[in-house]
Amino acid sequence: MLATGLSIVGLVFLIGLLAPLLTSHDPLAQNVRDRLASPSGDHWLGTDLLGRDVFSRLLHGARIDVPLAVIATLVPAVIGVTLGIVSGFFGRRVDAVVMRLADVVQAFPVYIFLVALVFLLGPGARSFVVASACISWVGYARLVRAEVLSLKGRDFIVAAQAAGIGRRRVLGRHLLPNVMPQVYAYMASDAVLALVALASLSFLSLGVQPPEPEWGRMIADGVDRIRSEWWLSAVPGLAIVIVGIGFSLVAYGFERQAARR
Amino acid sequence: MLQFVARRSLQGLAVLLVVLVASFALLKFVPGDPARQVAGPRATEEQVESIREDLGLNDNVGVQMWRYLGRLVQGDFGSTTNGASEVADLIRQNLPVTLWLVSTSLFVTAIVSLGLALLAVRRPGRLIDRLVVVTGSVGLAVPSFWLGIVLLIVVARPTGWFPIGGWGESFGERVRAIVLPCVTLTASLVPVTTRSLRTSMLKVRRSEYVAAGRSVGLTGISLFWHFVLRNSLVPTVALFASLAGMVLSGTVLVEATFALPGLGQMMVVGAINRDVNVIQGLTVVFATGVILFNVVGDIVVAWLDPRIERR
Amino acid sequence: MSGVTILEVEGLRVATSTHPSLELVRGFDLQVREGETVGLVGESGSGKSLTLRAICGLLPDGVRRSSGSAHMIGPGGSTVDAPTQLGRGIAMVFQEPMISLNPTMRIGDLVTIGPRSQGLLTRARAHERAIELMHEVGIADPERRSRAWPHELSGGLRQRVMIAMALATEPRILLCDEPTTALDVSVQDQILRLLLGLKESRGLAMVLVTHDLAVVSQVCDQIVVMKQGHIVEQGETDRVLHDPTDEYTRRLIEAVS
């Protein structure tokens, strides 16, 4: 399962990387006279409202969506895991502050918070990553904190500390390895959410701005034409679903690994 | 029990207070000078300064916050950037649509996911169970707005039974208008809820006390009612209370996709138009909704589960 | 104690559902007479709990009875499949009183839920009956206790409730899966004496799963020794404990004395 998931994501990533080589059309090149063309030998998926080649935009979209989803997952993961360790290990006051912060963040519905933050920071990819970082860290923090707390009282930790082994080593050697599979599983399913969130924000014109070929944005562009050129909206969505399934499989694989421990 | 209700409600209010302060802080971080925006590009420095006085922007932050909180409590959310309407009025206008969407979706989600979870749990590991688990994972990957569009393409367009977006005037029109949005929102919730319900129901089903029940001759409906249902109820209620965030979150996209004039759409429009008061007001309203859900959920759970401290 | 056999188990085998060749109980035979107490001993993993559960049909998910049978024998000599008699002649007492009682039911209701659900007890009579049963198992102040929730009671009290619950079904035989292992040492003795008392007062037959040979020597008429799913020795308690034929049995006895 893990392998399948990773290969799907890897494949899409590769496609994105090689996109300029796989298609001769420029994803940004407009040709208004040739707009809304049906799929043909020249344009495999036809052209959109501004005459741009849809297939090329689809492939180049992978260069935007996949890396951004990954970054928007990594940043909160690092922040969250760190805060979780700090909170669980150094206890009491630090813990109280971090947990109250988590409560406040979680009091807002995710997309409401996302829209509000993007409103503050202005639309765009960078705002999306920052906003994700502000929101998604909570899950990791709670997960890691719980694990740290449950391990803190265990005999071997106390023994290690009594033997004078530094806190950092205890953390590194014992605590982290135990919790990492769960963290990886969480990251993978978070990646799905990040991808969907990015597409959703872009759909709402609050994410990646035109003329970049982001998949969510492409779906929005095609909405007015669903009566006739329905594939303009349908195909990018399919791309999102496929990548999402890829990440889900990765998550499933890590979950099973975590369960085995 | 009453003490618990009081205590929990106070906790909720405390969180709400923090939320209000946070949303006030939001205002402070918006780039640009509000006084200048109101005054217009051709105003003189004196005019801008006097507007700044009027808006109370020269007072210290504490005083401003106090004033802001006071206004909120009285229901004054300010007006939109173009000054055309009061935010509070707009919220009142758009609230019913969102309430309709949220309540129908939660209702359908409850029925569907309970049904699916029950089916899956009857024979763990078999086909239905596997299917349910897989759909759960796949479901997350499907963006709700895309699903909505696909439904429009595949269902609304060919059949003509449902409008391609919009809210309609008459009751009949509105009923038809809410179907596809409800289905879309439900579809985004069902994977999550079914998975959780299945896990907690399995836990109950495999528990020793259910075996004990069977060992004294309980079977079928009797066993289900007294042992399985009563113990599954608590995690179910807890789950739905925690759904508040997800369902309110989902209204943003679903309303945008189907052009429903609700609070979610108002939020998006407000963000695009850079309308601070709208964003602020809605953030407060939504957060209040989540907090309310959670507090009520906790109270119901405490009432149902005898193990929880009620004092 | 008459010589009439009331439970007959023949060639019972238990295997995992996914891999039928992986057997956890490999051929178990037993005959229990009216009023007789049988001790089922063995180390952890010997299959004794699974055997007990297989007899009455309470095996967990993933494990099933692959062959063999367990029959209750009625007064006229009629045989009935034992799992169908759960709550109608055969009842079980579980190991962990913390998790064996329904947390959302009050004790008074829980005790009589068996016969009530079978329509054998009216609601009016049920409360009285609950108090009687609680008296019988030695629960002090039963009126007040009947309103309590399971989590409010101590381990020993919970186990007494568990026993009362089983007794409510008027069983002829009681299957006890390590009923005292999870309890404090001071309480273990009380519960055992209770069970012994019930054997006398009700003429109850019992199959007692335990890893404690001392208990077996005090309480049981017949002993069955299990190891890795097999029966290695079986017979009258006195005979087996004084003159074991099997090496494993010998070692078990030596470990205790």
Image (tube, grey):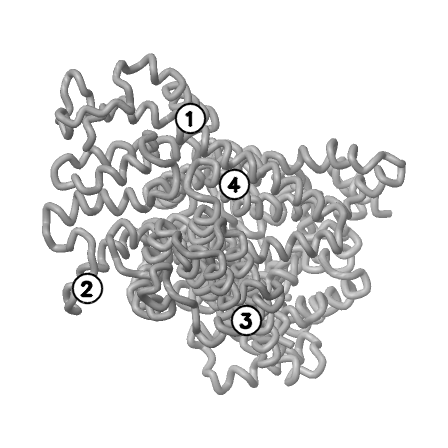
Foreground disc of the pair 1, 3 = 3
Q: Nearer the viewer, residue A78 or A182?
A: A78
Image point (61%, 63%), residue name: B61
Which label number is shown at residue B67? 3
The spot of residue A29 in percent (x, y) is 25, 22
Residue B36 in view of the camera: yes
**Quarter of the image with the N terminus of chain C in it:** bottom right
Are dots 3 and 2 on a single chain? yes
Q: Disc 1 versus disc 3: distance between alpha carbons?
A: 52 Å
How packed mark 2 is, by other alpha carbons closer than 10 Å (few <14, some 14-19, many 20 or more), is some
How packed mark 4 is, by other alpha carbons closer than 10 Å (few <14, some 14-19, many 20 or more), is some
Q: Which residue in the rendered view is the most extreme toward the right?
A: A163
- In terms of secondary structure, where does tag 3 sit? helix
- Would you say the residues marked 4 and 2 are in contact, meaning their CB atoms lie under 8 Å apart? no
Q: Disc 1 versus disc 4: distance between alpha carbons?
A: 23 Å
Foreground disc of the pair 3, 4 = 3
The spot of residue C140 in percent (x, y) is 72, 80
Q: Disc 2 versus disc 1: distance between alpha carbons?
A: 42 Å
Are dots 1 and 3 on a single chain? no
The residue that disc 2 covers is B174
Q: Which residue type does callout 2 highlight?
A: Arg
Q: Which residue type does callout 4 highlight?
A: Val
Foreground disc of the pair 3, 2 = 3
The residue that disc 4 covers is A130
The residue that disc 1 covers is A9
Image mark 4: chain: A
Image mark 3: chain: B
Image mark 1: chain: A
Image point (42%, 29%), residue name: A66
Q: Disc 3 versus disc 2: distance between alpha carbons?
A: 40 Å
